[in-house]
Image (cartoon, rainbow, N blue to C red):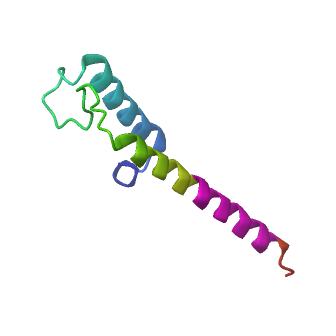
Amino acid sequence: LMVLIKNIEISLTVIVIYTVLEVVTLGEFMPWPHIFLFDPPIWEPTLSTKFTILFISVFVLLCITIVFIRRVDRKPK
């Protein structure tokens, strides 16, 4: 959107207005494609395992990134 409009304020305003309209009216105000789902979440037995793996993966990747950034900063120029 920002590439088309070339103005970050207008782009963010459009995104915020869309989000607020969708969330406040639960997707019933405008007949446009909805990116939000307002159904209650389904908790299947494997969902907690999936979230655990996701959080562990994010943590490991964060640690690797921090180590990499520190190594790059230590190298003499």
Residue 61 as seen in the image, left or right of residue 42: right
Q: Which residues are magenta?
A: 59-73
Based on the displayed image, in which of its 4 quarters is residue 44 positioned?
Answer: top left
> In front here: 61 or 13?
61
Instruction: Kindly identify the residue that appears in the image at 78 percent across and 66 percent down.
Output: 70
- Rendered location of residue 48, percent (x, y): 41, 40
- Rendered location of residue 46, percent (x, y): 34, 44
Magenta residue check for 60: yes
Number of numbered discs visible in the structure rendering: 0
- Rendered location of residue 12, percent (x, y): 43, 37
Residue closest to the far right: 76
Instruction: Kindly identify the residue that appears in the image at 47 percent across and 44 percent down.
Output: 8
Residue closest to the far bottom: 77
In this view, 43 is above or below 66: above
- Rendered location of residue 51, percent (x, y): 44, 44
Residue 9 as seen in the image, left or right of residue 21: right
Instruction: Kindly identify the residue that appears in the image at 39 percent across and 31 percent down.
Output: 16
Residue closest to the far left: 31
> In front here: 25 or 58?
58
Residue 17 as seen in the image, left or right of residue 51: left
Based on the displayed image, in which of its 4 quarters is residue 22 positioned?
Answer: top left
Instruction: Kindly identify the residue that appears in the image at 31 percent across and 33 percent down.
Output: 43
Q: Is the magenta region chiefly helix, strand or loop?
A: helix
On-image quarter of the C terminus: bottom right
